[in-house]
C-alpha cells in the first residue's frame, strides 16, 4: 500500500475527520497523526464569526477552526489563561458548570489575565462573545485544544476544574502534551478519584470510610459483598453522575448487576461499597490554597444516604447535625484538602450514621452545589477559588462564615419522568434530575415550601395523604409524623399492612388496595383526586423496585411523591408554614444584609 | 425612536428550573437582557427560581428574587419593587405563561404594570391555535388542519376525515410532553387518552401529519417602525415529525432555492406584522413540501427561544440583547452591531460558513420496560446540545459529533461502530443485502443514532434514493454523508 500523502490527509481534515478517526483508518495512533500533521503544516487556521462575512472590519475575537489559509486569530503578548467549558448539557452535568466557568473568567479578568474560553455548547453564557477576551467555539477534545494552543503565546496555563467532568477527562492528555494545568495537580486528582489510593489516604489520616472492595466477576463480588455485609452499593468505575450504580441486597442481585453491565473488565472493574442505610448525607464545598482551608458551605440532605447527591434535597446551613459531627466534618475537610494539596475548590461527601462521620468521596473541583452555596450565602465562591488558582492566598480575602447567615436555603431537584413512561421512579444512586430550584426563607419550613412550589407541584394544604411504609419504618417516629399531618387537617389512607400498624397506635385510617390486591386501588384513588400526597417508603429488594405505578400516577397528576420518612417530616413542616400564611419575598441582596 | 424615559424599574421573569424542553438557553437570554437594560440605566428586578443560573448572580440585577415563578409570588414582588414594566419574553414559555396569568388575574392593571417586548394581544394571537389560524388565513398563508378535542370520540371523528398518520399534541404541556404520532387507530386511541391525561386542561390537538416535509425555522426581529430583519434561517436535517429540539439543525439553510427562501422570508415578515410583535424577536417554523414546494406555517413563538440562542451563537448577532433594547423603544437602525461596532443592527447577518447543531440524549438513565422511550417524535427528549462551525457541512457535522462527548470521534470509523468496516467488507453479497434490508427497516424509525446507521447503509451498498425513501432526509444531506464515506474509503487504500 502506498503511504498516505499530505494532500489526502489535508482533504480529510477539510472534511472534518478527527485525528482519532484517521488513526483508526490508518492503523496508527492519534499522537502519530498529530505529529505528522504538525510536521507537514496541516494545522487549522481560525476564522472569525463577525455577522458580515468579513465585509466590514470586526475586532471581536470569536473564532472557529477550519483547514484553510489566512489565520484571523491574533495572539497578544498578554499573559493568558485558558478555561475549558463543560460541553453539552446532560444529566449530571448542567448549567451549574456554565455558571462556574463564567464566574471564573470574570475573576481572572479582574486579576488582569487575558482569558480564553473553549466550549461547544450554544445554550450557554460562557459561549457569549463578550464574556471572555477570546472565545473559541470548538469541541473539547485533546486535538482541538492543542490546535488552539499552537497559536497562543504567553499562556500561563489551563483551568480544567470548573467545567465538570468534560475538561477533567482530557487534562492528563493535555498535560502530557506540555500544557500546564492550573490548580490541583493531576496526580492529586487521581488520588481522589482512585478509590484504592483515596482509601489509603483516609486510613493514613485516620478518617472513617465505609468498607469497600473492587472486583471484576460475580463470584469475587459475592464474596466481597458477603464480607462487607449487605446491602452494598455497586457501580462500574469512572462513571459520571453515578450512571449504572445500584444498591444490592442479595447474591442474586449481584448476578443481575453483572448481567446488565456487560462492559465490566479488568480495566473497568466494579466497585463495591458498604451501603449505609438510613444514614444522613452531607455535602461540603471548600476552597484550599495549599496552606489554609475555607469551608464555604455545609449542606445536609433531606433524603438518607444512597440517593445521588445531585437528586437530593439540600439544606444550607444544616438543621439537624449535632455540633460534634459538624466539627468532625470541618476537621476532616481540612485534613483531606491539605493532604491532596488542593488549589481551588474541593467537594467532599460525608455520611453520618450512629454518630460516626464517614467520608464517602472527594472531588477536587467545582461541584454542582457551588452556585447554590453562593446564592444562599452571598459568598462569591467561584471568584475566590479562581483567584486562588491564579496565585492568591485565602488570607487576602475577607471571608465570612456560612454559619453566620440567619436564614435558610433549600435546593430541590427536578425530574423528567413524565417524558419516559414506565421508568422506575424511586430515587437511587444514579442521578436523573435535569435541574434544580431553590427556596430561601427565614425558617426551614418557609424555604422548603417555596422550593416545593417552584417544582411546579403545588404544596397541598388539605385533603388526604396516602401512606405505605416498609417494615423498618413501622416505628414510633412514623406515628409522630402521621400525627403531624392529622394535626394539619389531613385524612389518612393506607395500605392494609400500614393501616394495621397505625391502628395499633390509635390512628384511624382508611384502608386501600395495593395495585395488585383489587380495585379500586390506590392508583384509582389518585386518579380520582382523593389523594393529595403520597408517602411510600420502599426498602429491600422487592419493594424498592415494586409498585412504581403509584409513583408514575403521582407524577402525572403532579402530586408530591415522597419516598423517605425524613422528607415526609420536612414536608409537614413546610405545609404548616404555608398554612400560617407566612411566606414573604425578599431579594437576595437584602438577605445578604440581614 | 430613543429609549423610553417613562420607565424606571423593569421586572424580568426567568424560566425556572432546567427541564427537558427549557434549558440554559434562557439563562443566556435573561443574562443578556439584564445587562442590556442596566446598560440603558434602568433599575432591573429579576425573578427566577433556579439558583444555578448566571442571571441570578447578585451582582447582575439590582434586586434578585429566587422565588417560585407564579402570579402569587410575582404580585408580592410587584408590590415591593413597584416596576412600571415587565419583560416576559426572555424566560421561555414559563415566563410568558406567568405574564398572561398576571394579566388575566388583573394584577397588571391593579398595579398599573405594562408588558413590554410582547403585548397580551400578540401573545394570545400567537399562542391560541384558533386566533393564529384566523390570522394566517387573513394574510393568505396555509396552516395545517387540526382540531382541539376533549374526548376520544371527537378525536376519532377528526381522524376519520383526515386519515392517518395523525399527530396528537396535549394542550399546555412543555416540550410536547405526552404527545405522539399515530399511524393506526389502535395507536391513536392510546395516544389520545394519554395526551388527555397529560394535559392539565384535558385537551389535545389532533392534527394532520406533515411527516416527511422539510422543516425550517426563521429567527426574525421587528421594531416599532416596522423594520424587519431575518437573523438566521435554520434548516432541520431531520424532516417533520421530529421535535426541533431533537433534530439535527443546520444554518444557514442548505437546500432551499433563493426563490423558496424569499417566499419564506416574505411570509415571516407578514406573520410578525400580523401577529403584532413590534418590539422584539420571534421564531417562526415552516414546513415545506419537498415535492411541490407548498409552504405551511407550523407555529410562531413571540419570544426569545431555544433557536434564538443557537441563531445568536451561529451568527454573532445577540438576539436577546437587541430584543431587550427594542422593548424599551429603540429601533434596529439605532442600535450598533456589537461585533463590528460600525454597522447598525438593521443589517441582516451574512455568514460564510456552515453551523451544525446536534442534540445530546441521555436515554441510558431511563431504561425501562418501554422499548420506545428512545424513539424521537413530537415530544422533546434531549437534555442538551452542541454546535460546531465549518467551512462546509461535512466539516461542521463531524466536528459536532465529536463535540457530543458520547465517545464518538466523528461519523463512525472511530472504533465504536456496531458494524466495523472490516466486518462489512468481509460479508458476501447475500449477507450484505440482508443486513442492508435490516438497516433500512431500522432507519424508518427515528432514533438518536440513525446517522450512524445511514453510514452502515451506504457501506452496505444502499443508494441515496433508497435512503431518501425510508428517511425523507433531503438528498443533499444524504449525499454529504456519502461524500464523507467516500473520503474514508479513499483513505483506506493508503498506509501511514
Image: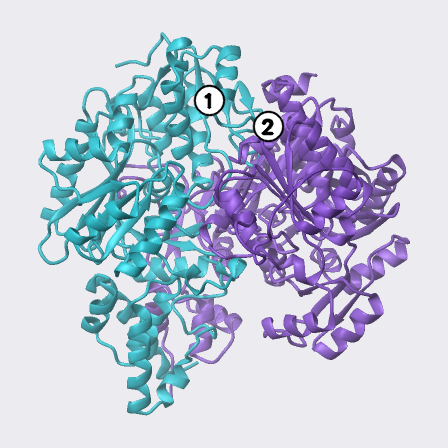
Chain colours: A purple, B cyan
Mark 2 lies on residue: A461
Residue A338 image point, x, y percent = 82, 47
Quadrant location, the C terminus of chain B: bottom left
For the residue pair B380 and B285, the one nearer the viewer reads as B380
For residue B350, side relative to residue A441 (left or right)? left
The chain ID associated with circle 2 is A
- The foreground one among A284 and B137 is B137
Q: Residue at x 57, y 24 (%)?
A: B59
Horizontal and vertical percent position of residue A84: 55, 49
User: Pointer 2 and pointer 1: residues touching (CB < 8 Å)?
Assistant: no
Asked if B65 appears above or below B384 in the picture, the reply is: above
| Residue B60 percent coordinates (x, y) | 53, 25
Residue at screen point 40% across, 57% down: B400
Q: Residues within 10 Å of mark 2 (few under 14, many from 20)?
A: some
Name the secondary structure under disc 2: loop
Residue A13 pos. (x, y %): 37, 66
Label 1: few (<14), some (14–19) or many (≥20) C-alpha neighbours in 10 Å: some
Q: Is residue A471 left or right of residue A448?
A: right
The foreground one among A17 and A349 is: A349
Q: Quadrant of the N terminus of chain B?
A: top left
Relative height, residue B495 to residue A419 (above, below): below
Question: Nearer the observer, disc 2 or disc 1?
Answer: 2
Name the side, left or right, on which A533 lies relative to B257. Answer: right
CA gap, disc 2 to disc 1?
Answer: 18 Å
Q: Nearer the viewer, residue B257 or A352?
A: A352
Q: Residue at x 8, y 55 (%)?
A: B292
Where B394 falls versus B325 (above or below)?
below
- Residue A413 visible in image: yes
Q: Secondary structure at mark 1?
A: helix
Which residue is label 1 attached to?
B71
| Letter of the chain that mark 1 sits on in the rendering | B
Q: Quadrant of residue A110?
A: top right
Amino acid at each position: 500500500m502506498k503511504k498516505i500523502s499530505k494532500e489526502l490527509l489535508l482533504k480529510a481534515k477539510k472534511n472534518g475527520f478527527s485525528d482519532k478517526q484517521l488513526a483508526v483508518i490508518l492503523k496508527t495512533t492519534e499522537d502519530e497523526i498529530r505529529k505528522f500533521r504538525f510536521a507537514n503544516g496541516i494545522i487549522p487556521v481560525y476564522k472569525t464569526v463577525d455577522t458580515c462575512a468579513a465585509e466590514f472590519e470586526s475586532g471581536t475575537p470569536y473564532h472557529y477552526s477550519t483547514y484553510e489559509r489566512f489565520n484571523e486569530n491574533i495572539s497578544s503578548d498578554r499573559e493568558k489563561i485558558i478555561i475549558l467549558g463543560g460541553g453539552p448539557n446532560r444529566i449530571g452535568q448542567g448549567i451549574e458548570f456554565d455558571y462556574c466557568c463564567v464566574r471564573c473568567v470574570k475573576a481572572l479578568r479582574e486579576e488582569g489575565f487575558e482569558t480564553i474560553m473553549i466550549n461547544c455548547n450554544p445554550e450557554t453564557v460562557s459561549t457569549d462573545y463578550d464574556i471572555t477576551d477570546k472565545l473559541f467555539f470548538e469541541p473539547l477534545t485533546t486535538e482541538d485544544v492543542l490546535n488552539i494552543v499552537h497559536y497562543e503565546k504567553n499562556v500561563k496555563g489551563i483551568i480544567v476544574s470548573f467545567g465538570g467532568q468534560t475538561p477533567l477527562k482530557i487534562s492528563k492528555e493535555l498535560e502530557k502534551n506540555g500544557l500546564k494545568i492550573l490548580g490541583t495537580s493531576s496526580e492529586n486528582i487521581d488520588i481522589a478519584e482512585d478509590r484504592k489510593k483515596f482509601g489509603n489516604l483516609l486510613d493514613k489520616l485516620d478518617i472513617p470510610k465505609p468498607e469497600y472492595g473492587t472486583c471484576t466477576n460475580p463470584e469475587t463480588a459475592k464474596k466481597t459483598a458477603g464480607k462487607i455485609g449487605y446491602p452494598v452499593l455497586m457501580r462500574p468505575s469512572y462513571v459520571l453522575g453515578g450512571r449504572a450504580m445500584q444498591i444490592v441486597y442479595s447474591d442474586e442481585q449481584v448476578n443481575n448487576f453483572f448481567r446488565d453491565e456487560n462492559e465490566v473488565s479488568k480495566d473497568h472493574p466494579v466497585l463495591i461499597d458498604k451501603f449505609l442505610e438510613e444514614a444522613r448525607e452531607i455535602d461540603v464545598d471548600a476552597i484550599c490554597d495549599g496552606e489554609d482551608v475555607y469551608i464555604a458551605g455545609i449542606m445536609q440532605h433531606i433524603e438518607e444516604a444512597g440517593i445521588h447527591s445531585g437528586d437530593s434535597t439540600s439544606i444550607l446551613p444544616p438543621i439537624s447535625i449535632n455540633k460534634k459531627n459538624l466539627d468532625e466534618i470541618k476537621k476532616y475537610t481540612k485534613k483531606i484538602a491539605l493532604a491532596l494539596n488542593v488549589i481551588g475548590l474541593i467537594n467532599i461527601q460525608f455520611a453520618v450514621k450512629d454518630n460516626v462521620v464517614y467520608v464517602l468521596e472527594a472531588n477536587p473541583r467545582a461541584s454542582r452545589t457551588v452556585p447554590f452555596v453562593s446564592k444562599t450565602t452571598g459568598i462569591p465562591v467561584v471568584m475566590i477559588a479562581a483567584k486562588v488558582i491564579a496565585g492568591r492566598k485565602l488570607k487576602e480575602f475577607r471571608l465570612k462564615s456560612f454559619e453566620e447567615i440567619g436564614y435558610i436555603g433549600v435546593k430541590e431537584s427536578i425530574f423528567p419522568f413524565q417524558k419516559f413512561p414506565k421508568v422506575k421512579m424511586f430515587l437511587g444512586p444514579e442521578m436523573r434530575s435535569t435541574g434544580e430550584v431553590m427556596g430561601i426563607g427565614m425558617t426551614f419550613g418557609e424555604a422548603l415550601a417555596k422550593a416545593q412550589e417552584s417544582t411546579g407541584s403545588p404544596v397541598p394544604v388539605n385533603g388526604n395523604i396516602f401512606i405505605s411504609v416498609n417494615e423498618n419504618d413501622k416505628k414510633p417516629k412514623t406515628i409522630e409524623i402521621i400525627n403531624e399531618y392529622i394535626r394539619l387537617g389531613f385524612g389518612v389512607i393506607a395500605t392494609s399492612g400500614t393501616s394495621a400498624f397505625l391502628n395499633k397506635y390509635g390512628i384511624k385510617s382508611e384502608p386501600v388496595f395495593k395495585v395488585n390486591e383489587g380495585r379500586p386501588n390506590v392508583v384509582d384513588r389518585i386518579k380520582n383526586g382523593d389523594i393529595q400526597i403520597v408517602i411510600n417508603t420502599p426498602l429491600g429488594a422487592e419493594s424498592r423496585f415494586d409498585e412504581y405505578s403509584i409513583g408514575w400516577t403521582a407524577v402525572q397528576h403532579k402530586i408530591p411523591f415522597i419516598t423517605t420518612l425524613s422528607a415526609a417530616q420536612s414536608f409537614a413542616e413546610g405545609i404548616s408554614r404555608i398554612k400560617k400564611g407566612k411566606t414573604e419575598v425578599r431579594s437576595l441582596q437584602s438577605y445578604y444584609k440581614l | 425612536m430613543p429609549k423610553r424615559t417613562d420607565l424606571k424599574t423593569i421586572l424580568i421573569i426567568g424560566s425556572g428550573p432546567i427541564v427537558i424542553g427549557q434549558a440554559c438557553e434562557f439563562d443566556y437570554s435573561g443574562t443578556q437582557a439584564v445587562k442590556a437594560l442596566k446598560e440603558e440605566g434602568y433599575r432591573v428586578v429579576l425573578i427566577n427560581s433556579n439558583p444555578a443560573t448566571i442571571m441570578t448572580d447578585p451582582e447582575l440585577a439590582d434586586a434578585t428574587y429566587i422565588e417560585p415563578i407564579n402570579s402569587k409570588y410575582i404580585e408580592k414582588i410587584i408590590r415591593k419593587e413597584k416596576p412600571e414594566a415587565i419583560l416576559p419574553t426572555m424566560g421561555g414559555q414559563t415566563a410568558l405563561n406567568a405574564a398572561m396569568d398576571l394579566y388575566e388575574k388583573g394584577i397588571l392593571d391593579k398595579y398599573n404594570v405594562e408588558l413590554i417586548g410582547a403585548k397580551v394581544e400578540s401573545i394570545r394571537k400567537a399562542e391560541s391555535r384558533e386566533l393564529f389560524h384566523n390570522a394566517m388565513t387573513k394574510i393568505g398563508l396555509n396552516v395545517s388542519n387540526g382540531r382541539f378535542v376533549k374526548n376520544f370520540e371527537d378525536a376519532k371523528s377528526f381522524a376519520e376525515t383526515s386519515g392517518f398518520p395523525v399527530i396528537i399534541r396535549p394542550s399546555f404541556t412543555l416540550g410536547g410532553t405526552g404527545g405522539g404520532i399515530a399511524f393506526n387507530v389502535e395507536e391513536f386511541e392510546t395516544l389520545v387518552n394519554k395526551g388527555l391525561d397529560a394535559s392539565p386542561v384535558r385537551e389535545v390537538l389532533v392534527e394532520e401529519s406533515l411527516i416527511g416535509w422539510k422543516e425550517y425555522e426563521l429567527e426574525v426581529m421587528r421594531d416599532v417602525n416596522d423594520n424587519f430583519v431575518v437573523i438566521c434561517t435554520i434548516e432541520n436535517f431531520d424532516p417533520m415529525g421530529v421535535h426541533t429540539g431533537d433534530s439535527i439543525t443546520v444554518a444557514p439553510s442548505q437546500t432551499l432555492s433563493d426563490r423558496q427562501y424569499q417566499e419564506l422570508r416574505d411570509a415571516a415578515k407578514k406573520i410578525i406584522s400580523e401577529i403584532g410583535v413590534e418590539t422584539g424577536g420571534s421564531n417562526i417554523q415552516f414546513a415545506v413540501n419537498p415535492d411541490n414546494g407548498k409552504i405551511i406555517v407550523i407555529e410562531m413563538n413571540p419570544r426569545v427561544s431555544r433557536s434564538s440562542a443557537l441563531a445568536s451563537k451561529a451568527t454573532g448577532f445577540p438576539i436577546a440583547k437587541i430584543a431587550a433594547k427594542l422593548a424599551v423603544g429603540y429601533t434596529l437602525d439605532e442600535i450598533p452591531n456589537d461585533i463590528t461596532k460600525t454597522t447598525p443592527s438593521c443589517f441582516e447577518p451574512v455568514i460564510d460558513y456552515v453551523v451544525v447543531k446536534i442534540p445530546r440524549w441521555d436515554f441510558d438513565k431511563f431504561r425501562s420496560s418501554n422499548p420506545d422511550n428512545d424513539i424521537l417524535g413530537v415530544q422533546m427528549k434531549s437534555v442538551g446540545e452542541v454546535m460546531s462551525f465549518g467551512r462546509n457541512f461535512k466539516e461542521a457535522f463531524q466536528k459536532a459529533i465529536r463535540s457530543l462527548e458520547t465517545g464518538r470521534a466523528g461519523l463512525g470509523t472511530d472504533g465504536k461502530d456496531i458494524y466495523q468496516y472490516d466486518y462489512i467488507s468481509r460479508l458476501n453479497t447475500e449477507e450484505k443485502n440482508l443486513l442492508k434490508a435490516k438497516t433500512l427497516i431500522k432507519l424508518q424509525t427515528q432514533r438518536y443514532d440513525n446517522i450512524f446507521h445511514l453510514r452502515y447503509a451506504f457501506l452496505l451498498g444502499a443508494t441515496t434514493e433508497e435512503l431518501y425513501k425510508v428517511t425523507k432526509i433531503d438528498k443533499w444531506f444524504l449525499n454529504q454523508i456519502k461524500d464523507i464515506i467516500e473520503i474514508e474509503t479513499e483513505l483506506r487504500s493508503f498506509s501511514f
